[in-house]
Image (spheres, rainbow, N blue to C red):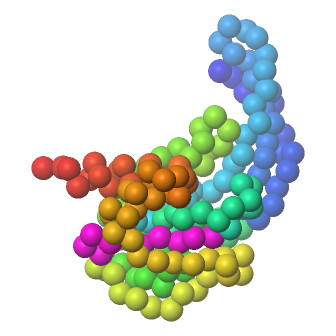
Amino acid sequence: METISSREVYANAWMTVREDAVRRSDGTDGIYGVVDKPTAAVVIPRDGDRLHLVEQFRYPVGARRWEFPMGTAPDRAELEPAVLAARELEEETGLVAGRMELLGDMDIAPGMSSQREHVFLATELVEGPVRREHTEQDMRAAWFSTAEFEEMVRRSEIVDAQTVAAYLLLLLHDRRP
């Protein structure tokens, strides 16, 4: 596929939206709307059999959602993924990881977004002060056993796709010989 032209149609501090005119391999023309967001990190804070989640109001779906701590750097900045993961963990939960291990990478929504996400397992956790951004003031945090987490997924209480996919990476990590 060949990009014929590209134009930015919207931008804010978190993302840009562009419209690309394309030519497919069969010669037909088309368009793509693409949401460009900076690299993101998802962090799975684990202490033994417990997982630390955050809950916040997610405006696009009009509801509160439990999920793993995650995010991007402010003002569409690009940060090294491990630095970003440590920053998000401390900011949202107050936890500092003595050990941070990359579990894998994910494309968040490759049909509409260029954003790549890196999933980290955070262990050897020490509690400290929460440093949430102004937009995260309604956030809550809590520990859940893995059995509670899995039951919340079964009951559709955890429906964040990134959280569920990150948990699969954790399960695969734990099954390695």
Residue 140 appearing in the image: yes
Q: Residue furthest left?
A: 177
Note whether 49 is above or below 102 in the view shown.
below
- Across and down, in percent, residue 9 comes to 87, 45
Quadrant holding the N terminus:
top right
Question: For this view, does 55 lie left or right of residue 165?
Answer: right
Q: Quadrant of residue 27?
A: top right
Question: For this view, does 161 lie left or right of residue 45?
Answer: right
Identify which residue, 42 or 171, lies in the foreground.
171
What residue lies at 51% left-to-right and 78% top-to-bottom?
A: 141
* Total numbered circles: 0
Question: For this view, does 62 lie left or right of residue 42?
Answer: right
What residue lies at 52% left-to-right and 63% top-to-bottom?
A: 67
Note whether 28 is above or below 38 in the view shown.
above
Identify which residue, 88 or 9, lies in the foreground.
88
- Across and down, in percent, residue 31 comes to 79, 26
Note whether 128 is above or below 37 in the view shown.
below
Residue 87 appearing in the image: no
Identify which residue, 4 or 159, lies in the foreground.
159
Q: Residue furthest right?
A: 9
Q: Residue furthest top?
A: 26
- Across and down, in percent, residue 110 comes to 59, 38
Question: What's the magenta region?
Answer: 46-56
What residue lies at 63% left-to-right and 34% top-to-bottom?
A: 111
Is 104 one of the magenta-colored residues?
A: no
Identify which residue, 2 or 150, lies in the foreground.
150
